[in-house]
Image (tube, rainbow, N blue to C red):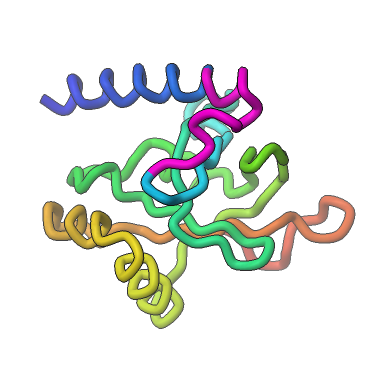
Amino acid sequence: MSNVKDRVMKAVNAVHRGIFRASKGRVLGRAGGMPVVELTTTGRRTGAPRTTMLTSPLVEGDSVVLVASYGGDDRHPVWYLNLIEHPEVQITTTGATRRMIARTAAGGERDHLWSRLTAAHANYAGYQRRTQRTIPVVVLDPVQGRGELPPTVGT
């Protein structure tokens, strides 16, 4: 069954990405009241760029928050596994493309973000009820300075 879900998600992503790119985000640039983010990671096995379409339930200043829910599946989404291995990512949202560093929120930071995002978007709480795993909350921070990485990256 999971292979069917994976194929459906891949097809939906491809259609969404094509429309998003062709319209420069004017069409399908928001979903569920959230901005859409085109996330490009580096494949952990291939080293090749991998792109997926996501929503961001929270944007705080220059930082963007993503949720690795995969609809409440018991598996982490592949994009999350990729950014754990290679935390430098690229996002396109609201017509701008930026290099970012991904990190998984932990402890009090995760609790605070989870509380805020589930208050605004209850579907995430529903996804958490469907799975035994703790759904990761990912914070994307801009690459600092002239492209140097911050002192701590990843999880």
Q: Is residue 9 left or right of residue 103?
A: left
Q: Residue 69: x percent and y percent?
A: 30, 49
Q: Is residue 72 left or right of residue 108?
A: left
Q: Residue at x 53, y 37 (%)?
A: 29
Q: Residue at x 40, y 78 (%)?
A: 112
88 part of magenta stretch? no
Front residue of 6 and 34: 34
Q: Is residue 48 left or right of residue 119?
A: right
Q: Residue 27: x percent and y percent?
A: 53, 28
Q: Residue 1: x percent and y percent?
A: 10, 25
Residue 155 in view, yes or no: no
Q: How many marks?
A: 0
Q: Is residue 90 depicted above or below 148 in this figure?
A: above
User: Which residues fall within the magenta stretch?
Assistant: 19-31
Front residue of 44 and 92: 92
Front residue of 133 and 38: 38
Q: Residue 114: x percent and y percent?
A: 35, 70
Q: Residue at x 74, y 55 (%)?
A: 143
